[in-house]
């Protein structure tokens, strides 16, 4: 599903450049539940941005769903994101003036689905995350856990190939963290590839494979107890 | 291309951000309001100038005489100049081609009496063409004609207000009045746009008055309407020529303005049209400046708005919005706000102008201020284009922002 070979990325800082990713090789198969761990500055967010087509790499190859990602213009990247990827962010990133239902339906708008149909599909996904009754609420009327579940529903609504979650529990307390992780596990059980970035050991432990990054290189890549238990 | 979903997105964004939308709309509405008022007032001034001269024919010219102030050919200063029938005939025959209307005028003050009502009025003894030169409007009966002149008939055309003074609401046409001791038949009643003074006045034949004064041939003034086919400049030249020749004919020093002068509407017309041109130039400059300020204003607000919405655009892009769809959305929103607000300003402006109407005519010389449909259409087009520009420039920048940068701004 995701194949990365000798990936490099640097950011210019004034006259110098900061070498963030120093040759990453990573292969994630369909249906995997992977977490990327690392302290801040390890390059994990950069990796997620590149995988999520939100940023472009300098060197190396990146295949998404068998397709080589190269020379993408913004428009193509937007279409691929819409088609293959679902995002879950630490700060939820819901649009404040849209209701929960409208937020979930937004990716379908960019897909070109008509309003009636997309509201119906969005409602199904809201139901799936247990928030059907909150459909007409604005994000400001929802708790953190509820917001993240709306965001997860939004990430799933286009039926993507991969769900990318950037510190999905970073802004949540322990109880809600568990419920969000349970939700991600359920999604994974249904066959969805889930790619989580986190710095919390407990969160990573709940995934099936942990990839540890330090200073732009992979230092370990292990299966978790959860995976071994299967 | 009509995209209902796109419009729904825009209405939602406007509706959920009312203050912001109203603020940007206000800038445009205010600019357009000022623009409309400026143009309206300018056209009101123009209308006033035009109508100020509408009392008399636009092509009127008159030869007037007083006393000489310069010695000439052995003649002393202080000599009173008297125009006579021969002078009138000379001018009208000599310049026949350049003349449309012609009339002599003798000024008299006569007491006019009907039964017990009597008063003294200005009476002008004139030729039939005088009706057109003075734009006398006949309410009842007829004006003087050539037969009245030929037969030196004792007929009189009275102003609406004389009739009111002497007859009240009773009919006056066909009645006889006593004019300075002689009985005159009222053949017509007129009104005049020139105001009360022009309507408290009467007209009698030139020849009749001359007969009353011992068959003399004196006249006070020669009134002409120059040929309307003459250009303004040609008409001014014609006036100068008449003035020169009349001075020569009456042995007046060529520079003696006080003895004889020709008052020519062509000169006033030229002055008014130059004045109006200058006025519209100034107004046009200020008006377009106001519009430009409005456009810059909304552009600034849009830049601010887009900064505020950077994160939203980042989210939208992460969810699959193409840069084009972001630009389209912002531009469409901007055009919608500019057009609606501009239309509001325009309507308000037109409404204010029509409410003003003629109420400022007396003190401020503004008559019937209004904007022409051409200007309205032009302003609307400018609005839409400015909305496009105001939205496009910042939207382009917004669409270029990478989603990660937008999303990082927590």
Image (spheres, rainbow, N blue to C red):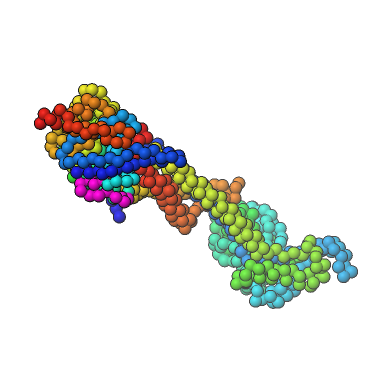
Q: Is residue B21 above or below residue B156?
A: above
Residue at the (57%, 62%) spot, across then down: B137
Q: Does the magenta stretch include residue A104?
A: no
Q: Residue placed farthest to the right in the image?
A: B74
Residue B241 percent coordinates (x, y): 73, 71
What is the quadrant of the C terminus of chain B in the image?
Answer: top left
Which quadrant of the view contains residue A173?
top left
Task: Locate residue B108 relative to residue B137 in the image: left or right.
Answer: right
Question: From the image, which quarter does the N terminus of chain B lie in?
Answer: bottom left
Q: Outermost residue toward the top?
A: A174
Residue A144, quarter of picture:
top left
The answer to which of B296 and B353 lies nearer the viewer is B296
Q: Where is residue A71 in the image (x, y as percent from the top left)?
A: 31, 51
Relative vertical location of residue B270 with respect to residue A18 in this rendering, above or below: below
Residue that appears at 77% across and 65% down: B260
- The answer to whether B66 appears left or right of B142 in the picture is right
Q: Which of A76 and A64 is in front in this view?
A: A64
Name the side, left or right, on which B232 lies relative to B26: right
Q: Can residue B408 be seen in this view?
A: yes
Task: Name the one closer to the observer, A83 or A35.
Answer: A35
- State the residue at coordinates (56%, 52%): B285
Residue B303 percent location from the top left of the image: 43, 42
Q: How many labels does the image show?
A: 0
Frontmost residue, B301 versus B182? B301
> Compared with residue B265, is residue A169 higher up or lower down, i.e. above or below?
above
Image point 62% across, 71% down: which residue? B230
Residue A107 visible in the displayed image: no
Region rendered in magenta: A62-73
């Amino acid at each position: 599903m995701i194949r990365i070979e000798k990936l490099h990325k640097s950011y210019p800082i004034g006259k110098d450049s900061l070498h963030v990713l120093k040759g990453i090789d990573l292969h994630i198969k369909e249906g995997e539940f992977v977490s990327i761990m690392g302290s801040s500055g390890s390059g994990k967010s950069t990796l997620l941005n590149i995988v999520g087509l939100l940023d472009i790499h300098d060197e190396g190859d990146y295949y998404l769903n068998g397709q080589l990602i190269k020379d993408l213009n913004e428009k193509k990247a937007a279409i691929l994101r819409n088609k293959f990827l679902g995002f879950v962010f630490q700060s939820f990133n819901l649009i404040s003036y849209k209701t929960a239902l409208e937020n979930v339906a937004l990716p379908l708008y960019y897909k070109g689905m008509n309003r009636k149909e997309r509201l119906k599909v969005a409602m199904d996904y809201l139901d799936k995350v247990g928030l059907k009754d909150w459909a007409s609420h604005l994000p400001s009327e929802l708790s953190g856990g509820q917001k993240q579940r709306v965001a997860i529903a939004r990430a799933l609504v286009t039926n993507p190939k991969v769900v990318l979650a950037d510190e999905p529990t970073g802004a949540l307390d322990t109880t809600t963290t568990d419920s969000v992780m349970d939700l991600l596990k359920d999604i994974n059980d249904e066959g969805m590839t889930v790619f989580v970035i986190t710095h919390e050991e407990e969160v990573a432990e709940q995934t099936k494979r942990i990839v540890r990054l330090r200073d732009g290189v992979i230092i370990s890549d292990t299966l978790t107890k959860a995976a071994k238990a299967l | 291309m009509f995209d209902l979903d796109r419009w729904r997105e825009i209405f939602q964004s406007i509706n959920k951000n009312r203050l912001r939308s109203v603020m940007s709309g206000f800038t445009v509405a205010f600019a357009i309001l000022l623009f409309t008022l400026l143009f309206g007032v300018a056209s009101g001034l123009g209308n006033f100038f035009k109508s100020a001269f509408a009392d008399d024919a636009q092509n009127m010219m008159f030869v007037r005489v007083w006393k000489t102030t310069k010695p000439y050919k052995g003649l002393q200063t202080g000599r009173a100049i008297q125009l006579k029938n021969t002078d009138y005939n000379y001018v009208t025959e000599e310049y026949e081609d350049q003349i449309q209307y012609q009339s002599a005028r003798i000024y008299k003050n006569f007491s006019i009496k009907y039964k017990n009502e009597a008063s003294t009025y200005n009476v002008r003894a004139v030729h039939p063409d005088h009706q057109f030169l003075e734009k006398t409007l006949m309410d009842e009966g007829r004006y003087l004609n050539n037969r009245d002149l030929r037969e030196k008939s004792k007929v009189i055309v009275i102003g609406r207000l004389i009739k009111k003074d002497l007859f009240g609401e009773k009919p006056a046409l066909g009645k006889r009045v006593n004019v300075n001791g002689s009985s005159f038949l009222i053949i017509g009643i007129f009104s005049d746009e020139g105001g009360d003074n022009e309507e408290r006045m009467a007209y009698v034949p030139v020849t009749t008055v001359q007969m009353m004064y011992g068959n003399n041939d004196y006249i006070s003034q020669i009134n002409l309407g120059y040929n309307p086919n003459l250009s303004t400049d040609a008409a001014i030249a014609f006036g100068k020529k008449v003035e020169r020749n009349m001075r020569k004919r009456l042995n007046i020093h060529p520079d003696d303005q006080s003895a004889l002068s020709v008052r020519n509407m062509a000169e006033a017309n030229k002055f008014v049209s130059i004045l109006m041109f200058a006025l519209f130039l100034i107004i046009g400059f200020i008006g377009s400046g106001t519009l430009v300020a409005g456009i810059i204003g909304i552009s600034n607000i849009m830049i601010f708005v887009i900064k505020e919405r950077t994160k939203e655009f980042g989210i939208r892009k992460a969810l699959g919005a193409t840069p084009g769809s972001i630009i389209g959305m912002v531009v469409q929103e901007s055009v919608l706000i500019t057009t609606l607000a501009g239309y509001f300003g325009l309507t308000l402006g037109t409404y204010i102008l029509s409410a003003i109407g003629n109420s400022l005519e007396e003190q401020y010389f503004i008559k019937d201020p209004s904007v022409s449909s051409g200007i309205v259409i032009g302003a609307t087009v400018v609005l839409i284009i400015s909305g496009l520009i105001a939205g496009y420039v910042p939207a382009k920048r917004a669409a270029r922002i990478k989603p990660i940068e937008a999303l990082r701004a927590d």
